[in-house]
Amino acid sequence: MYAPRSIANVTHLGATLPKRSCVVLKKSAYAIATIATISTFTTPALAELGPTPSFPSTFTAQGLEEPLDPLSPPLIEPFSEPPIAPAESAPAEDDFFSPENSISGPTDEEIESEVGDIQPLPRPRQAQTPPQPNGQLLLRSSAFTSSNVTGSALTSTGDAVFSNQATFIVTPKLGPDTRLIATAGGGLTRFANEGENNYNSLGISIGVQQRFSDTTYGQLGWVNDQFYSIATGENTLSDNSARLVLGRQDELADNLRLDTAYELRARFTSPVERSRISNSVSTRLRYDFSADWQAALSYRLSFSEYTQNSRSDTFHQIQAATTYAPTKDTFVTGFASYAFGNSSATSAELDNLSFGIGVGVNLPLF
């Protein structure tokens, strides 16, 4: 069989299995989408910034793979939870953190994305493969449309969103089955029509990933995201999160892989009314058509309980993505995502349909 390139979110902003059937996509961490969770690309919606898409955590840092969306950008993290963008014009009652995520990108979440998460360490049998770089610079750029960028039933509106992110990630080994994952980065997010909601973001994350067996791993980490309004220059949201991710990766065939993950995340925010505890389960089925072309279908279910008010959310997200990697350090991806769910907050609207494209470059540093 062919030997897919090993390219490894985030959010906000999904380790590698350089096996012949595993082209590494990011997200076992906060897609880096941020890189994040990695990864992937993640962009907050307006009000919370509602359900905004995050770039699919496809390829993350070299040698690292981002599981569906948790430390972005892990789920394995291909989805990263979107941060919140300013929405000064939105009613106070609508100023809730929007639904978990949308599509992922790299910046913590997601690099998380979200970056998202970084995949488990390479398996012992793969020790003969070239060593992975311990430090990389991840560059991500994406553009997508969203049917509901506000996440609000009162001011629901569609828009086109443009995101550019840069994330530095280091992944030194602490032992044969243990790896430290640390990221630092920033991003620029711009809206085609809702220009008053444009924002910049900064994020850092640190976590430890432990491989329990050839197919399972766990990750414990901390993520800090800061969002700044371009219109006012103010820090509109400060988000500190503790997260635990448990994931599994199964090769069903030479070119078919199934990733599953569970994430527990506690967010402590300012404003405090956005603080919440979320439980998420996700799964992703990936098929490699060739060494440089693959497609994935992902699903994520999240339950969120807000700690400073009586709000609770149930959020679903389905995402389809295809990625082409002309080299081991570059990729182009296209994706479609549909999110839906229910919220006890009558002003919240979780339904969102998104389509987008993105490009990424991984620059090994050392």
Image (spheres, rainbow, N blue to C red):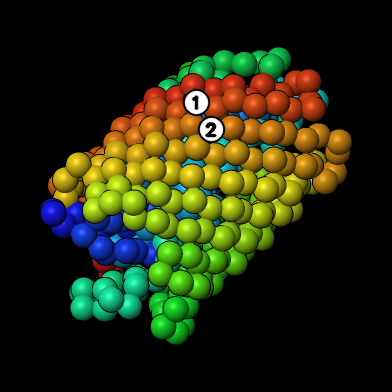
**Residue position for label 2:** 317
Judge whether residue 142 can be spotted in this image. Answer: no
In the shown orientation, is residue 96 left or right of residue 253? right
**Residue position for label 1:** 338
Judge whether residue 286 can be spotted in this image. Answer: yes
Label 1 residue SS: strand
Labels 1 and 2: the sequence-earlier one: 2
Question: Which residue lies most toward the bottom here?
Answer: 175
Label 2 residue SS: strand
Q: Do the CB atoms of the residues marked 1 and 2 lie less than 8 Å apart?
A: yes
**Quadrant of res 350:** top right
Tell me the quarter of the image containing the N terminus: bottom left
In the shown orientation, is residue 306 left or right of residue 30? right
In the shown orientation, is residue 119 left or right of residue 153? left
Amino acid on which the number 2 mark rests in the picture: Gln
Amino acid on which the number 1 mark rests in the picture: Tyr
- Return the mark for residue 303: none
